Amino acid sequence: MVSRAERGPVADWFWTIDRFFLAAFILLMGIGFMLSFAASPAVAERLNLDSFHFVKRHAFFLLPAIATMVAISFLTPRQVRRAAAILLVVSLAAMVLALFFGVEVKGARRWLSIGSLSIQPSEFMKPAFVVICAWLFSEHARQPEIPGNLFSILLFGIVAALLVAQPDLGQTILVTAVWGGMFFMAGMPWIWIILLGGVALGGFVSAYYLFDHVAGRIDRFLTGEGDTFQVDTAREAIIRGDWFGKGPGEGVVKRIIPDSHTDFIFSVAAEEFGIIFCMVIVAVFAFVVLRGLNHAFKERNDFARFAVAGLVLLIGTQSMINVGVNLELLPAKGMTLPLISYGGSSMTAICVTAGFILALTRHRPEKRATERSLFRSGMMAPAE
């Protein structure tokens, strides 16, 4: 146990970190590792691999991802901004490279192959994009003459264009929803809400007519006709699990779900452990989002407020999309369940997101005292 009397970096970290956030993130990763034993062997066997191939790789990615999260949580807000700026530049450059030199899977170029590893740069772009946009919004709020909002719009345009070029419409919708929520919190004028809402609607309609796979998924969702095997099987797994599940290793339907270890791991959890267990998973995600928004509400520093709110919205919206697809409430979309689904890029990137959240929500008595003093004197607290 670390004593309060100690003043080393580790002791300071232990007593200033939001341990509820940390526990929630570790719990979700533990659930994901446990579910990998249930969800991945059938997929590995279909690919003529060792039954525990994906379990071993999940463990291989898990430990470095946790180390990354903890390491980032030591950063100050200023260091978080700098790390996010570097990560954003690198990830955007990698996304451009992926368009020309990336591995093509089902007509999409989203991955870069480095040795035996495949990296999806857009996963790392998302938390960096949120942090940098939070900084731009906060700078505009602090000094209105700084065109932070305009720069944020331009940056969003670049990111959206690269995602559409891959194409990855699901990630585009996710980034758009999170960015729009942050812009709204930053005081978006109503004219901008109407304008950007119209652009988003126009983009959605254009995607329907320009991309056949988008039109196909939406049509199958609305009519129930066509190749709906994966979502129908996922729904059957959920129904078969009932309230308490069939028990660990007793799932049958999970064996024929093609992406049971990634996009449809929620259905595997439902079949083997029941709907109540799935409700617990949803509750943990809801706790992360609500606690993050509560931190943002209390935070006087604009940058920290926008960044924390945006980062928890990123996790919450992605989990909502994944669960919605599993429950056939949304059209099918390949999107992982944060911290639970198998995937090296996804898991590491979400741990970067979690690390940013932990770093920005740490208790800093000296900073709080300074902000209270400035607030009482009528001065605006400077961005850290």
Image (cartoon, rainbow, N blue to C red):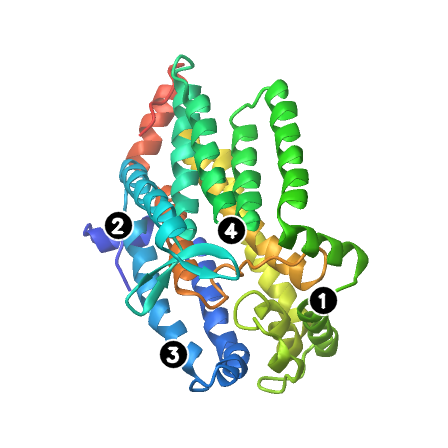
In whole angstroms, how far apart are the C-alphas of marks 2 and 3?
A: 34 Å
* Amino acid type of the residue that numbered disc 1 sits on in the rendered structure: Thr
Which mark is nearer the camera, 3 or 1?
1
Q: For mark 2, what is the residue?
A: 12
Q: Residue at x 56, y 35 (%)?
A: 181
Q: Position of residue 184 (x, y in %)?
A: 57, 29
Which mark is nearer the camera, 2 or 1?
1
Q: Assign a secondary structure to mark 1.
A: loop
Q: For mark 3, what is the residue?
A: 56
* Amino acid type of the residue that numbered disc 3 sits on in the rendered structure: Lys
Mark 3 vs mark 1: which is more N-terminal?
3
* Amino acid type of the residue that numbered disc 2 sits on in the rendered structure: Asp
Which residue is outermost to the right? 223
Q: Residue at x 49, y 39 (%)?
A: 160
Q: Assign a secondary structure to mark 4.
A: helix
In whole angstroms, how far apart are the C-alphas of marks 2 and 4?
A: 27 Å
Mark 4 vs mark 1: which is more N-terminal?
1
Q: For mark 1, what is the residue?
A: 228
Find residue 27 and name its label. none
Label pair 3/4, CB-CB below 8 angstroms:
no
* Amino acid type of the residue that numbered disc 4 sits on in the rendered structure: Ile
In whole angstroms, how far apart are the C-alphas of marks 3 and 4?
A: 25 Å
Q: For mark 4, what is the residue?
A: 315
Label pair 3/1, CB-CB below 8 angstroms:
no
